[in-house]
């Protein structure tokens, strides 16, 4: 496992982290004991960064991670969690109200609940789930979180940017107000490279790259029959409903043709694409089995995609919001 600095925090984190959304249950049925075994296997393989949220199964993901931490006796595991706003903004609202969406009572309640579920005395990284474009000017949230830092309840502060809106984090990065920003970044969602990454690098703000495998599409295993096998009501079933699944398959075919035999699998190309950007401190694929852990960890070997090949993939950029 290779490790990278996590911005200016002084942490060294595994460049492959563990995305905890799936183990919360939103992606289909989960076996908590199996999830704990998978987490412990990931820790044994050198993964030392786990991302979760109150939203993931209404705290269930946090509780499962807490059980794994309880059983783990090895090196430090950094856990990042999130609090959602009191009102989730519409994806179509370009300038949603931000002031008052993370009031003191709400943040304190979320911090205490996360501490309890995770079974820790301090949260390593506490993120605002769903950032807004005016948050760097409306700072009531920061006053509360700084108080919580002073009280020892949290160590570092971060934000998770809205889906497909990476430029909403640019001013925040330039000001260096938080330790990290989490953003969607993969071979389809390429736009963070343009403005956000340079701004984050200039202020030494850590970047957490989420959805590196595009919610499973970039693993490369989907067929026209895949959608019918997904649990009705699951996150994947909802995201790729209607003609979205067919659109994705069409894009995947073009991407596979571009990659050809340059990489053994589409999944490897996807992971190496993200890892090849030094602005990224850690990427957080979801993993439900030890086998998936092993597959992802194998890519942390220092091998990168060439700049020339990355340039070839620019034409495959596809910004859309299937979370709506």
Image (spheres, helix red, strand yellow):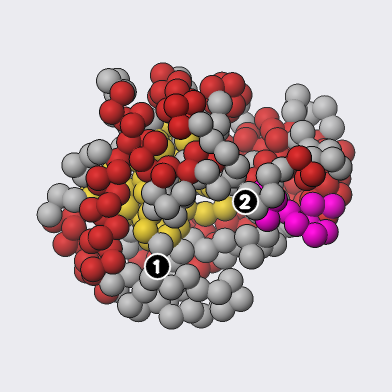
Q: Quadrant of residue 6?
A: top left
Label 1 sits on residue: 85
Q: Is residue 238 magenta?
A: yes
Q: Quadrant of residue 111?
A: bottom left
Q: Is residue 117 above or below residue 39?
A: below
- Specify which label sits upstream in the sequence, 1 or 2: 1
243 with respect to 88 (left or right) = right
Mark 1–mark 2 distance (CA, rounded to whole Å): 20 Å
Q: Is residue 77 magenta?
A: no
Q: Position of residue 31 (x, y in %)?
A: 51, 31
**Which label number is shown at residue 241?**
none
One can see residue 68 in this view: yes
- The structure residue drawn at horizontal position 40% and vertical position 67%, both measured from the top left corner, is 85
| Residue found at x 55% / y 31% | 288
Q: Nearer the viewer, residue 284 or 110?
A: 110
- Of badges 1 and 2, the one in the foreground is 2
What residue is rendered at 52% in x and 59% in y?
196
Q: Bin the neighbour count of mark 2 within 10 Å (Cα to Cα): few under 14, some 14-19, many 20 and up.
A: some
Of 136 and 198, nearer the camera is 136
Quarter of the image where the C terminus is located: bottom right
Circle 1 residues within 10 Å: few <14, some 14–19, many ≥20: some
Q: Is disc 1 placed on a helix, strand or loop?
A: loop
> Which region is colored magenta?
235-246
In percent of width and height, residue 148 lies at: 18, 58
Q: Secondary structure at mark 2?
A: helix
Q: Which residue is mark 2?
A: 235
Residue depicted at x 44% and y 27%: 33
């Amino acid at each position: 496992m290779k490790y990278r600095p996590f911005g200016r925090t002084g942490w060294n984190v595994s460049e492959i982290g563990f995305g905890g959304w799936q183990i919360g249950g939103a992606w289909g049925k989960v076996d908590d004991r199996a999830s704990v075994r998978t987490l412990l296997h990931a820790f044994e393989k050198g993964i030392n960064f786990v991302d979760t949220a109150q939203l993931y199964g209404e705290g269930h993901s946090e509780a499962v991670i807490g059980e794994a931490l309880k059983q783990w006796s090895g090196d430090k595991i950094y856990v990042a969690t999130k609090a959602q706003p009191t009102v989730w903004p519409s994806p179509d609202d370009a300038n949603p109200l931000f002031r008052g969406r993370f009031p003191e009572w709400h943040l304190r309640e979320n911090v205490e609940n996360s501490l309890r579920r995770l079974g820790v005395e301090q949260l390593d990284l506490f993120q605002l789930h769903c950032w807004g474009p005016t948050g760097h000017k409306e700072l009531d949230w920061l006053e509360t979180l700084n108080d919580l830092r002073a009280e020892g309840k949290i160590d570092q502060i971060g934000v998770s940017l809205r889906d497909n809106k990476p430029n909403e984090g640019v001013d925040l990065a330039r000001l260096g107000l938080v330790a990290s920003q989490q953003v969607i970044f993969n071979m389809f969602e390429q736009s963070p490279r343009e403005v956000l990454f340079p701004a984050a690098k200039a202020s030494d703000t850590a970047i957490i790259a989420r959805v590196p495998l595009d919610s499973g599409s970039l693993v490369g295993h989907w067929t026209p029959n895949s959608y019918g096998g997904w649990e009705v009501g699951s996150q994947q079933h909802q995201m790729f409903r209607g003609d979205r699944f067919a659109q994705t398959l069409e894009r995947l075919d073009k991407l596979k043709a571009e990659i050809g035999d340059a990489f053994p699998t589409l999944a490897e190309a996807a992971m190496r694409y993200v890892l090849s950007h030094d602005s990224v401190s850690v990427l957080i694929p979801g993993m439900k089995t030890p086998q998936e852990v092993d597959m992802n960890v194998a890519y942390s070997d220092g091998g990168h995609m060439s700049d020339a090949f990355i340039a070839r993939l620019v034409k495959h950029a596809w910004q859309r919001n299937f979370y709506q």
